[in-house]
Every structure is written in structure tokens, then in C-alpha cells.
Image: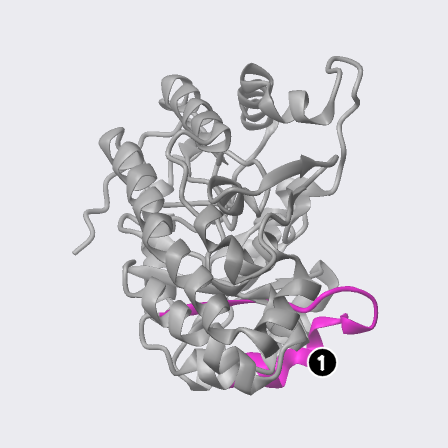
């Protein structure tokens, strides 16, 4: 049972009430209104920084004081209405766990990627978790520094890590992974399984550190839990058949989500959504983030049947929509189990949205 303590954040005096709304959402219920975060999916990664202070992009990513100063400035300037929380999570890109398993990371402006380090069964001896990995060392340094300065200002979360089929993709490369799925399926399963145990151990390490400092469980999606929270995913699911997904991804997803109290599955577009029935059948997953994509995959209204399908399964869903889509969406969908992400920075407009959501019954 969660204890709804208040971290006493200066910019978030309504923290406990917001968490009560989020916990109702985890349970597919609504208190006074649905939760809403006033930022779009991945908005924090839309803008690259100038490179006038660092010789390489990696140096910028590794500049701990710069990274912490950025969050302090953002919190100082920001308003945090609704379920928008001042928070920071240490970030070296989505393939950082593959880096801990032996891959080298390449750093770009707003993300990083892994250089494949495996090519077949003969390379299994190379696959081992490195507890002294430079990436894990840096993530601990970023976390520790944030914990030193966060009190009364912001939440500190844990980094974004991907085990399972996505990790095998990072370690092998997509083309080689597909060759190995056809030629050496047991090798691929062994790679995935060898990553599972250290993944959970690293997650436990970060959670222990955060909980010891009075923090919550939260990461890039910015939806906290007083207990263990995880964002399982399989972006490669967009490129594989249902049979392949069910054989190479689903068993490991089922395995990892049992470790956490709350799980929000990241459904990255319509390709991944072809596996939705299998994912909805996993009882440990309480919610699903629907990422509808861009271009012809917008507007949100074309995805109302999919969202209702998730609701009909008794599950909750994160929905990213534009402000001008809010009213038609409210007319079409029941509020139970909905958490909204709306890209809006004006506090007056945000307050008008909150007032409108109170009428959504």
C-alpha cells in the first residue's frame, strides 16, 4: 500500500492531490478530473543545444554540472499546473543499457545509439554486464549530483533503459538480428535472457538510491509512483509479425513487468499496436502510452477506436493531443483511464483546460 507523502516541492504545493489523481488513473478510475501533463511526448528532446562549450557531443552529455544547471533553470522559470511535475532524470539515451552490456554509444544532438558488438553465437562470450561501465558510472554521478540539490525543487528519477528484443537489436544491429532470428533463434533468446537479470538489478539499484533519499519512482514519461514504476516497450515490434513478437518479445515482457508495481507500456505507433491484444492480456500492465506518430497519423480522433479498445479492457491510456482536439476528444471518449499530454505553456490557458476537464463526466 502506497504512503502518499509530500516531498514539499516549492513549485508543486498540490503534489499529494496530483498523486491521488494518478493513482486513481493507474486503477482506471477518475477522482475530480483526469490527470493532465502540459507538455507533448518527447518535447524535451526537440531542441538541440549550441556546441560552443564542448569539444564533442559526448562531452556535453557528460557535463554533469551543465545538465543539473539546466534542470534548475527550467524549474525556476516553469509553472507546473495539473499533473506536470518539476523533475529530472539522468539520460544518456535509450541504448544505455546495451552500453552496459558491451556496446559503445555514439552521441548525437538529442539522442544516442549503440554500435552493434555481437554478430552470432560465437560472440556470446563477449556478452556480459559491466558493473564498472563508464555509462553506469556517469548515470550514478548524474543521479547523485541531482539528489544533492533537488530538495524542495524537483523530483529525481531513474534513466531510460531497454532490455528485451530492443536490447538485442542494439547489440546485434537490426539486419543481423533478423538473420539470427531466422538462423539461430535460440541464440537470440539467450542474448535476451542474459540481459534480463542485470537489467532488473540495475533498476533495483537506482530505485534503492532514490527511495533512500525520499524520492518516487519516475522516469522520462514523468508519471510518478510511490512504488516501483516501469515503462516496458518493444519498438522493434513495429517490424515483426505477431508470431515473432509472441516468441521473442512477449515472454520477456511478461517476465520483467512482474518486478514492478506499476507498468505503463510504450506503444510506439500503429506497427506496435498490431500486438495490442497480446499486451492487453498481461495483468501486470496497468496502462499504455499511445504514440500515434506524425503526419498522416494525426489527428488523434482517428485513433479513438483504439483508445476505447484499451479502456474496454479495463486498462488506462496516455493520450497526447493538441489543444484544439480536446473538446471533440472529450465528446467521443469516456474519461475513465485517460491521462492527457497537451503541449501548452501559457498558465492561463492551462487553468482553462483544468476547469474544462472538471466538467468531463
Residue 162 seen in render: yes
Query: Residue 297 magenta-drawn?
Result: yes
Position of residue 294 relative to residue 148, above or below, is below
Q: Nearer the viewer, residue 246 or 103?
A: 103
How many marks are shown on the rendered structure? 1
Task: Tell me which residue sits at (46%, 45%) in the image.
Answer: 219
Point 75% across, 16% down: residue? 55
Foreground residue, 235 or 72? 235
Say if the magenta span includes residue 301: yes
Residue 297: image quadrant is bottom right
Residue 310 in the image: state x and y as whole percent: 49, 80
* Residue 56 in picture, x, y percent from top left: 74, 21
**Relative height, residue 253 to residue 55 (above, below):** below
Report the span colored magenta: 285-309
Decide: few, some or many residues near mark 1? Use Cα within 10 Å; few <14, some 14-19, many ≥20: few
Q: Is residue 147 above or below residue 288?
A: above
Residue 293, horizontal then vertical, whole percent: 72, 65
In the image, taking residue 267 as reference, residue 30 lies left or right, namely left
Q: Residue at x 66, y 64 (%)?
A: 176
Mark 1, residue position = 302
On screen, 213 above or below 273?
A: above
Q: Is residue 337 left or right of residue 273?
A: left
Among all residues in the image, which is located at the extreme front? 122
Amino acid at each position: 500500500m502506497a504512503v502518499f507523502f509530500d516531498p514539499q516541492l516549492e513549485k508543486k504545493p498540490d503534489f499529494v492531490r496530483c498523486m491521488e489523481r494518478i493513482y486513481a488513473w493507474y486503477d482506471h478510475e477518475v477522482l475530480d478530473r483526469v490527470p493532465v501533463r502540459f507538455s507533448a511526448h518527447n518535447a524535451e528532446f526537440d531542441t538541440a543545444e549550441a556546441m560552443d562549450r564542448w569539444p564533442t557531443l559526448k562531452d556535453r552529455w557528460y557535463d554533469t554540472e551543465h545538465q543539473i544547471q539546466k534542470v534548475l533553470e527550467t524549474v525556476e522559470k516553469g509553472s507546473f499546473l495539473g499533473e506536470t511535475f518539476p523533475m529530472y532524470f539522468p539520460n544518456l539515451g535509450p541504448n544505455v543499457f546495451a552500453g552496459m552490456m558491451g556496446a559503445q554509444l555514439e552521441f548525437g544532438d538529442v539522442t544516442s545509439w549503440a554500435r552493434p558488438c555481437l554478430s552470432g553465437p560465437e560472440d556470446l562470450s563477449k556478452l556480459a554486464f559491466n558493473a564498472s561501465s563508464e555509462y553506469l558510472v556517469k548515470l550514478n554521478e548524474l543521479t547523485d549530483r541531482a539528489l544533492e540539490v533537488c530538495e524542495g525543487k524537483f523530483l529525481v528519477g531513474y534513466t531510460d533503459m531497454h532490455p528485451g528484443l530492443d536490447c538485442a537489436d542494439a547489440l546485434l544491429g537490426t539486419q543481423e538480428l533478423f538473420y539470427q532470428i531466422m538462423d539461430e533463434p535460440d541464440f537470440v533468446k539467450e542474448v535476451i535472457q542474459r540481459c534480463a537479470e542485470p537489467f532488473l538489478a540495475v533498476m533495483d539499484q537506482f530505485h534503492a538510491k532514490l527511495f533512500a533519499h525520499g524520492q518516487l519512482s519516475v522516469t522520462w514519461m514523468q508519471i510518478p509512483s510511490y512504488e516501483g514504476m516501469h515503462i516496458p516497450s518493444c519498438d522493434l515490434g513495429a517490424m515483426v509479425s505477431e508470431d515473432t513478437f509472441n516468441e521473442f518479445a512477449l515472454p520477456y515482457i511478461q517476465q520483467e513487468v512482474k518486478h514492478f508495481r506499476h507498468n505503463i507500456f510504450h506503444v510506439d505507433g500503429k506497427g506496435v499496436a498490431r500486438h495490442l491484444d497480446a499486451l492487453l492480456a498481461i495483468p501486470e500492465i496497468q496502462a499504455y502510452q499511445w504514440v500515434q506518430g506524425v503526419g498522416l497519423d494525426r489527428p488523434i480522433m482517428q485513433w479513438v477506436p483504439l483508445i476505447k479498445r484499451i479502456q474496454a479492457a479495463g486498462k488506462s491510456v496516455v493520450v497526447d493531443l493538441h489543444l484544439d482536439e480536446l473538446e471533440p476528444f472529450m465528446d467521443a471518449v469516456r474519461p475513465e483511464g485517460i491521462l492527457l499530454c497537451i503541449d501548452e505553456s501559457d498558465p492561463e490557458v492551462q487553468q482553462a483546460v483544468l476547469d474544462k476537464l472538471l466538467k468531463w463526466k
